[in-house]
Image: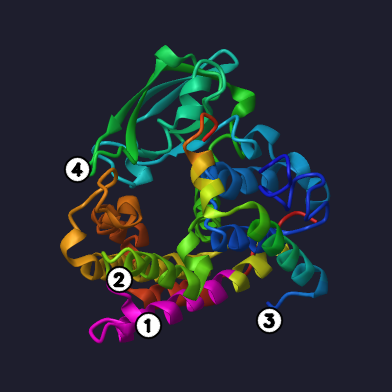
Amino acid sequence: MYEAGFVGADVAQGGPAAAGSTFVEEMILQEEMALAKAPPVLNILAVGMAGPDHQSRTAPTSRRSAIPPKMLSCEEIWCQGYSEPNSGSDLASLQTRAVKDGDHYVINGQKVWTSLRTHRGLDDAAGAHGPERAQAQGHHLLPARHARARRRRCKPLEQITGDAEFNEVYFDNVRVHESQILGGLNNGWAVGLTTLMYERLALGFGLAGAACASRSTGSWTWRGADEGRARPPRSDPGHAPEARAAVDRYRGVQVHRRARHHQAAQGELPGPEASAGKMMWVEGHQRVQEMAMELQAATRSSCSGSRWAVENGLWQYRLPALPRQLHRGRDHRDPEEHHRRARARPPERLDP
Amino acid sequence: MNFGFNDEQELLRSTARKFFDNECSSEVVRRLMDGPRA
């Protein structure tokens, strides 16, 4: 997909969007991929979060091809180490340490709830090319891309569904050259915050549901109905209003995303307002998954691999949908706080 | 803020949609996802 120009269209050379295209063109391509039910971008943490952040801090917009090609081609799968045992996501209390040793930093510590760490592509490259970030003392962000595998161990956190969406990652005397610090020494807090703001945009790229609007809300149930194993929501008296509400909610998310991406295309770094889209998406996604389970009735307990499972058990992922409540973060308790911050914050712009 | 699409962006959208309609059926996606490069 990268070689065809369908990943990172705003930074790739050539391809259908060609040079000079922006987040908007990238968004268009991702929406069309979602409509076609193509798999979402795998390396979303690199393409949508770390890459743009790194790019905006290391190169002016006139040289925006600075995103490493291996990010776009998935030769390097990126993940980020924020949460730690006993620290949660409280970055001020992190225990992972980076100690200066000559022109290197030596990292020791443990991260938890790390996504994508065990993907097969990364395992293949773990010896020399598996990059990830370690948040360290003084809030540096260090890519541990060249660490040897035995010094950077990974333990999958297996869920009740059998999947391991998250992992624990251990750093054991991992050495990273000082030139690899992202955003400069003691600037990890600012880099991390901006990366998270890009996450709000990136999730809009990767989540097919928000992009597909009405078609995504209908397709799984119609297919289930054709197979005789689920009721179509729009003709089900108990769910038709909720199905229509889901379509409206997704369209709201879609409009919000487009506004945020147009802002980014104008050179404005995403701010607190970008988080509203994630809050909207989480609520909508949870409701749709709950409705999907209700409509499957007797087959709802059939998981992937069962001949009775609708869409091969796709919607049985309701279990992870519940913890997605955490995706909205603490501010979901006070949406007004989001609006207040968004209004008060002057826009931060990329370098000209 | 105008966040509609201009003519070039609409052309990109229609081109991508035609491409995926022709080249990215569910059967193709599932076959690729079952393959060694997935």
Task: Assess whether mark 3 and mark 4 are in contact (beta carbons under 8 angstroms).
Answer: no
Q: Are marks 4 and 3 on the same chain?
A: no
Q: Are marks 4 and 1 on the same chain?
A: yes
Image position of A318 with respect to A192: above or below: below
Its colouring scheme is rainbow
Amino acid of disc 3: Met
Q: Label 2 belongs to which residue?
A: A287
Within 10 angstroms of label 4, few (less than 14), some, or many (20 or more) residues? few
SS at circle 2 = helix
Could you say where residue A104 lies in the image, as x and y percent from the top left?
56, 17
Residue at point 51%, 41% (across, down): B31
SS at circle 1 = helix
Count of labels in the image: 4
Q: CA distance from mark 4 to mark 3?
A: 45 Å
Amino acid of disc 2: Arg
Q: Label 3 belongs to which residue?
A: B1
In primary-sequence order, the first of circles 4 and 1 is: 4
Query: Which stretch did the figure color magenta?
Result: A231-257
Q: CA distance from mark 4 to mark 2?
A: 21 Å
Q: Label 1 belongs to which residue?
A: A245
Q: Quadrant of the C terminus of chain A?
A: bottom right
Task: Assess whether mark 2 and mark 1 are in contact (beta carbons under 8 angstroms).
Answer: yes
Front label number (3 vs 1)? 1
In primary-sequence order, the first of circles 1 and 2 is: 1
Could you say where residue A122 lies in the image, as x and y percent from the top left?
49, 27
